[in-house]
Amino acid sequence: MKLFNLSKTIAVLVTAGLAMGIQPAKAALTSAELATLGIEGTPLTPVGAIRAGNADGSIPAWSPKSSLVPPPGYKPGDAPDPFANEKPLFTITAKNYTQYQDKLNLAQIAMFKQYPDTFRMHVYPTHRTATYDPWIYEATLRQAKSVTMCPDQTTTGKVCLKNYVLGGGTPFPIPKNGDEVGWNHFVAYRGTSYDIVGNGALIDSLGGRTDVLQHSRTIWPWWFQEKDFPQNPWFKAFGPAIFCDSQEVLQPPRSAGLMFGACIYVDDPTAQSYLYVPGQRRVRKAPEIGFHDSPAFGSDGQRTAASRWMHYFGGVDSRHDRKLLGRKEMFVPYNNFKLTQENVGFDQIFGKKHINQDLIRYELHRVWTIEANLKPGQRHLYKRHIAYFDEDTWEGLGFVVYDNSDRLWRVGEQYLVYNYDPRFVGIYGDSQIDLINGRYTSYNYWYRQASKAANFKNPIISSDSSKVPFSIDVYTPQGLRNMGTR
């Protein structure tokens, strides 16, 4: 992949980072590197994105003042579309995609080949809406001064961090290898807690759909203020907890009540997971949840932990070597407000073969790419895994994976949208397509439609770590037992 012909400062930094893609990360950022990061007046944004626009202006410059302003009458939880009147600049189809191939990822190219009659990409003007509250940037600049990967991650593959500070932050805004990109994505800011219902829909090869509604209770202790960090020793079992999740199946009825609680930690991202089985009325340890290529919860075996958010570490001992391929311009799903509107239901979103492409908005953004290859002697369903990440958020945008016969097997996209309160660009939905069996699935997203389907209260996405809207005991075995038997 080519580097952008930008300022000398950026070129030197990026070139150095790519050159070190196969080298151990030995230290935190230097003072010279830190000086290139800032909220204003620096070549890189606080999270390491290139501040400048591109040469022809199709990607604008980033500004911390480019936040979307809610319209009059806005209420928390609303998702007004500020770009509703914009028209596509052009549409990419199976007939013309080769003209744009240098700005398409491998998943998109595969979809044009697999579904030439229905897959298309409407490309709109680019808006760099990914802005955060100042404390997010301050946390990143503070974290980047000291944090490093553990020495073992660059030698044996053990996944862990050292020299971190509590309070959040993107750890490696100037990444020097694929693992550092993986960490940036792993802890990308998505709020500090969620209390939502989502739909992890399953679509068979004939287009039949099963809606799997699940109640998610999620916290991100990585982003908690230090004073708010949970005092229960459970949340410091392997260093501080990074991410804790619980999902409870609401429908289909045959699975209702099945629920898990899990945390992953700075020193060990293997999920410490427990499962409540309603038919047995008991809690058991569930090491398979969130582990490498184990099936994702509620996915009917069609997704793996490794493809959550388009890329996921999945365990303390990495089974893949991750190579940093660089940063380039690509057409990616962004500002997908059409998906969030109340008059858009599941029947409109989920097509027979893939997501309804007329609802997806593509924009030109700069994208980081990593390629993960299975290490000699290791076993995994995915021999090769290529993943794409947004430079402004470190959020996943797409992926492709190959099986152990080197066949292109599964591809995916993630649909990003601006969240007004708290403000960030995050995931509203995704899709993962099995190119071999013709099925596709979605993760537990689409919370506005799912909440309506489940008669759930208003979804809560919070940035206040002092006000988690549920009991965090749900992540402990005893708390999960109490929740399941109440």
Image (tube, helix red, strand yellow):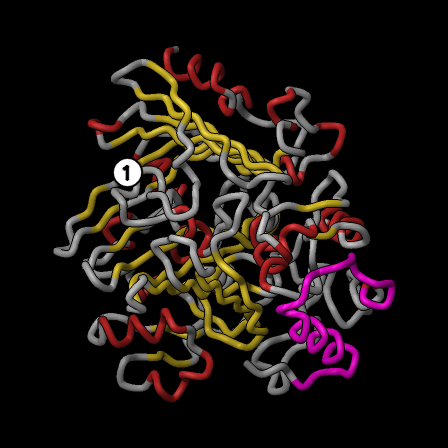
Secondary structure at badge 1 equals loop
Counting from the top left corner in percent of width and height, residue 275 is at 38, 25
| Outermost residue toward the left in this view | 206
Q: Is residue 40 visible?
A: yes
Q: Quadrant of the N terminus?
A: bottom right
| Outermost residue toward the right in this view | 31
Q: Quadrant of residue 471?
A: top right
Residue sitting at x 54%, y 43%: 316
175 sits to left or right of 260: right
Does 280 sit above or below residue 102?
above
Task: Out of 293 and 464, give the one closest to the viewer.
Answer: 293
Counting from the top left corner in percent of width and height, residue 352 is at 19, 58
Q: Which residues are magenta?
A: 5-33
Residue sitting at x 38%, y 39%: 198
422 sits to left or right of 304: right
Q: Is residue 71 visible?
A: no
Number of marks present in the image shown: 1
393 sits to left or right of 480: right
Task: Out of 52 and 307, give the one closest to the viewer.
Answer: 307
Please tell me whether residue 14 belongs to the stretch shown in magenta.
yes
Does 17 sit above or below residue 167?
below
347 sits to left or right of 80: left
Residue sitting at x 32%, y 69%: 406
Please tell me whether residue 78 belongs to the stretch shown in magenta.
no
Counting from the top left corner in percent of width and height, residue 125 is at 51, 74
Crowdedness of circle 1 by 10 Å Cα count: few (<14), some, many (20+)?
A: many
Counting from the top left corner in percent of width and height, residue 135 is at 75, 46
Q: Amino acid at mark 1?
A: Val
Residue sitting at x 73%, y 35%: 225
Q: Which residue is mark 1?
A: 212
Q: Quadrant of the C terminus?
A: top left
